[in-house]
């Protein structure tokens, strides 16, 4: 076992754990606003961390593979939260019902004030 395999394996296992936690959250959380958190955890934790693990493992294949993997991870890292924000803002604007125990809606309060 080379010294690169251990951190690579650790990152892959962390990615698998985050993906499973995110999938469980999608099943267990009550509304679209809370479920989006689980989806983002699954995307960022599951794919980005795993891609960094693959970049470490693939560093023996040459410089191009890790560079492409890191570029892919950075694209996911920047586009996933942006897309989630746009989807949730549209859901809020469409008055998608919130979980009944939601006690604070700052966006609605801001819309009333402004």
Image (spheres, grey):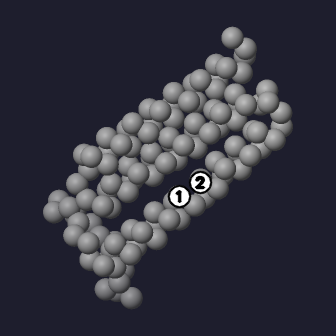
Q: Is residue 107 visible?
A: no
Place of residue 37 in the rendered image (x, y in percent of width and height, measured from the top left): 39, 53
Residue 108 to residue 32: above or below: below
Q: Nearer the viewer, residue 4 or 98?
A: 4
Between the residue at mark 1 and the residue at mark 2, the CA separation in whole angstroms equals 6 Å
User: Where is residue 60 shown, x and y percent of the image?
Assistant: 79, 26
Q: What SS does tag 1 mark?
A: helix
Q: Would you call the spot at circle 1 few (<14 residues within 10 Å), some (14-19), or many (20 or more)?
A: some
The quadrant of the picture occupied by the C terminus is bottom left
Compared with 110, 45 (above or below) is above
Q: Are marks 1 and 2 in contact (CB under 8 Å)?
A: yes
Q: Is residue 33 visible?
A: yes
Q: Quadrant of the N terminus?
A: top right
Q: Which residue is mark 2?
A: 76
Q: Residue at x 63, y 32 (%)?
A: 53
Tell me what residue is drawn at x 26 percent, y 50 percent: 29
| Nearer to us in this view, 61 or 20 | 61
Please give the residue where the numbered disc 1 appears in the rendered image. Answer: 80
Looking at the image, is 52 positioned above or below residue 44? Answer: above
SS for dot 2: helix
Expressed as whole percent of the image width and height from the top left, the position of residue 113 reads 34, 86
Q: Residue furthest right?
A: 63
Q: Is residue 48 above or below residue 112?
A: above
Question: What is the residue that sits farthest to the top in this orientation?
Answer: 1
């Amino acid at each position: 076992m080379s010294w690169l395999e251990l951190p690579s394996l650790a990152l892959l296992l962390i990615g698998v754990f985050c993906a499973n936690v995110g999938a469980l959250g999608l099943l267990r959380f009550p509304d679209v606003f809370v479920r989006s958190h689980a989806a983002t955890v699954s995307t960022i934790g599951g794919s980005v961390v795993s891609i960094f693990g693959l970049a470490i493992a693939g560093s023996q294949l040459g410089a191009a593979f890790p560079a492409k993997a890191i570029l892919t991870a950075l694209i996911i890292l920047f586009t996933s939260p942006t897309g989630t924000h746009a989807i949730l803002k549209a859901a809020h604007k469409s008055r998608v019902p919130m979980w009944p125990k939601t006690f604070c809606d700052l966006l609605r309060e801001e819309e009333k004030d402004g």
